[in-house]
Amino acid sequence: DSGVTQTPKHLITATGQRVTLRCSPRSGDLSVYWYQQSLDQGLQFLIQYYNGEERAKGNILERFSAQQFPDLHSELNLSSLELGDSALYFCASSGLAGVQETQYFGPGTRLLVL
Amino acid sequence: AQSVTQLGSHVSVSEGALVLLRCNYSSSVPPYLFWYVQYPNQGLQLLLKYTSAATLVKGINGFEAEFKKSETSFHLTKPSAHMSDAAEYFCAVAHTGANSKLTFGKGITLSVRP
């Protein structure tokens, strides 16, 4: 158990819909990362937040957005969903934001768009 | 830009045999390198990381990896495979500067035969 929690574990929805994925980092961790894992793209970095502020953006679609709240939990919002958005979405957290920091991964949210 | 390459998508070994999973990196600056393991239907778990303190890095579950700058490699090894080692293994490089995202290789599935 990494200490990172993600809800829900599974999500089934239809094209065009909007969903919110939630992540609670390890106690005391300030940095949260979101990754997408799909069969064709592999594991890809989406976005990073540090202490409430956006720190870095990766291959995140404009239909996707995220935020980190004062209590440090984070939410990833996916809108106008397409079939290709079906994937496993991971949240990771680290104490600070340095490159040497270990990122601890949550169990993931499996999204299926029908 | 930093990147990692994991050649091959599947490795099969017999129980008790040596495990060798290859990872080569590309980086213009000294890299921070990681190996993660993903068991079926689970999140990623850190096996070990290289942060320039020592070239031979020991991790959990008997795994180790050696950083070889001349070969730009960070191969993962384990002297004797166990059935419980069957999983997917990812090599990753952390980016330097303000953006500490991880860039992952495509992953290698390890099968262990009885």
Image: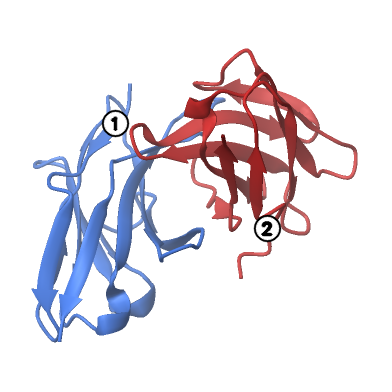
For the C terminus of chain A, the image quarter is top right
Q: Where's residue A66, x and y in %?
A: 72, 27
* Nearer to the camera, A24 or A21: A21
Residue A4's disc is 2
Q: Is residue B29 left or right of residue A3?
A: left
Q: Horizontal and vertical percent for residue A76?
A: 71, 33
Asked if residue A79 is positioned above or below residue B14 in the image, the reply reads above
User: Which residue corresponds to the image point at 10% horizontal and 73% vertical from the top-left?
Assistant: B13
Q: Nearer the viewer, mark 1 or mark 2?
A: 2
Residue closest to the eye, B1 or B17: B17
Rendered blue, the chain in question is: B
Chain letter, colour red in render: A
Instruction: Give coordinates of residue A52: x percent, y percent.
Output: 81, 31
x then y, percent, for residue B88: 31, 59
Q: Residue at x 32, y 80 (%)?
A: B84
* Residue type at the position of mark 1: Ser
**Helix, strand or loop for disc 1:** strand
Q: Residues within 10 Å of mark 2 (few under 14, many from 20)?
A: many
Task: Report whether residue A98 is seen.
Answer: no
Residue that badge 1 annotates: B3
- Residue at screen point 80% across, 44% down: A73
Q: Is residue B65 left or right of residue A58?
A: left
Circle 2: residue type: Val
Q: Tag 2, which chain?
A: A
* Mark 1 burial class by Cα count in 10 Å: few <14, some 14-19, many 20+: some
Question: In terms of depth relative to the viewer, which is nearer, A16 or A49?
Answer: A16
